Image (spheres, grey):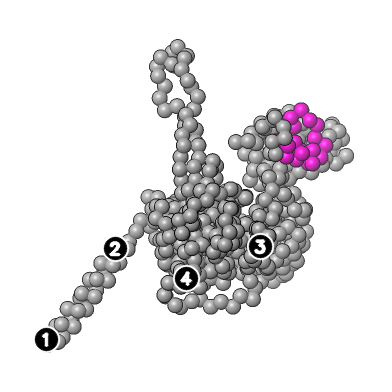
Amino acid sequence: MEKFGKNLLNAVLIILISGGVAAGVTAHIMKNKNAGQVEYSGSANSTFKQPVHLTTYNSVAAENTDFTYAAEKTIHAVVHIKVMSTVSLGRQYMDPFEFFFGFGDNRPRQQLRTGSGSGVIISTDGYIITNNHVIDNADSISVTLNDKRMFKAKVIGSDPSTDIALIKIDADDLQPITFGDSEQLKIGEWVLAVGNPFDLTSTVTAGIVSAKGRSIIAGESDKDKIMSFIQTDAAVNMGNSGGALVNTKGELIGINTLIYSQTGLYTGYSFAVPISIAGKVVSDLKKYGTVQRAMLGVSIADPELIKQGEDPKIKELKGAYVKDFAMRSSAKEAGIEIGDVITTVNGNRVTSWNNLQEQIMKYQPGDKVKVKVDRYGTEKEFTVELKNLQGNTEIIKGNNSAETLGAAFKVLSDKDKREYGVNYGIEVYDISKGKIRDCGIRKGFIIMIVNDQKIQTPEDFYSIVDKILKGSTDEKGLLIKGFYPHSGATRHYAIDLID
């Protein structure tokens, strides 16, 4: 009986200790051409290649819960990023004498602000992945390595749609991280988040993959954002942004990007951009200066609307329902129809719109993909040649006017000119995220004059924008004159390109 009592007491102590540990770790997140290689060539002596996605990758979900190997392999590849930026503050107080007598300085006040985040070394000669929101609008960027060395960094390129940026420091013989394959991740697999939360450098936390292809709406929805995250329960806080999400082999499988919280602190879940997307983005940024974004040219319906009977012929929705097409749609040209449900892209399962985005994002304009659809119970397969926003397969260069404007244009036909009573002009036939949409221009608008110059072709427009972006003209913005065919009334729009 005495022995039984001792065993019972030991069991109670174990339960109490376990309960205490569980309570102790409770924390508080922010609401807010085909398969191949990514290659970076820096100095003459340094070249490295990283797999974007490997169709022959035979990894098995790791069962080893000893994370020391993964931590030791990755901690020196994760850096601390500090940024300095200048922000304008509105007038907080108006002196009554200034209000009545009109004297005083009414200019907005400037304030210097600092911010911090994390980054991941991906080459021996200093290329680093981070989040766009970490370095956006920064006046200066400094990088501190795990060995405490500090460097100034420059921005090579950034992509707000995926929240991924590529920066570089002048350093050699760095320890880059090894790329893994995020598509082989399994729900329940152990992962580590490596970063610098609250400026606490070289912090490693562990968790499991809670979900894949997760769509998170933070604030105002933006259809142009790539929203297909890896969801984990590894603790991530402010300062972890841009840091590494790695598997137990120490391979990079995601870039930690956001948390979902009403307090601004971790409450259980964090989200990372899959390396299948981030790797392709940084490869494009280094090679071209901007992302080569492939378009399928489809509009996908909200699954809830389908469930409510928008298309009664759909009994069960397992994929992405095609509701409409963009102009010059690659999918439509290939034979896909409204009402089709896209189920796979090159053999990879499609379960939702954000999952479809993730699959298409891996490819370049000009790539051909096999798309399977469920057409009211009948499976069909189509070969689709992906195009860019402009409806072609040409490479877009960095600081490109087309990327900045975020719209596609076409020359007016002779029939259009006769109908509109003009002999020049271009039509806005598609709009994405960019300056054109921001200023209020809608599809169908006919652009006649830009900065007092007649516009005959899209290249005329691009040339004006390129000169401003390159600083080869004193002008800083665009004054656009044109009309909408249905009304005929002349409209003017102003765009500030240097903001």
Q: Residue at x 84, y 32 (%)?
A: 422
Q: Nearer the viewer, mark 3 or mark 1?
A: 3
The quadrant where residue 425 appears: top right
Quadrant where the N terminus is found in the figure: bottom left
From this view, report whether residue 179 is shown above or below residue 447.
below
Element type at marker 4? helix
Within 10 Å of disc 2 (Cα), the crowding (few <14, some 14-19, many 20+) is few
N-terminal label among 4 and 2? 2
Within 10 Å of disc 3 (Cα), the crowding (few <14, some 14-19, many 20+) is few
N-terminal label among 2 and 1? 1
- The image position of residue 63, as x and y in percent, is 46, 78
Comparing 310 with 119, the one in front is 119
- The image position of residue 21, as x and y in percent, is 28, 67
* Amino acid type, residue under disc 1 in the picture: Glu
N-terminal label among 3 and 4? 3
Q: Residue at x 18, y 83 (%)?
A: 7
Element type at marker 2? helix
The quadrant where residue 67 appears: bottom left
Quadrant where the C terminus is found in the figure: top right
Within 10 Å of disc 1 (Cα), the crowding (few <14, some 14-19, many 20+) is few
Query: Does 455 appear in magenta?
Result: yes
Find disc 4 in the rendering and name its residue: 70
User: Could you tell me if the residues under marks 3 and 1 are in contact, i.e. CB atoms within 8 Å?
Assistant: no
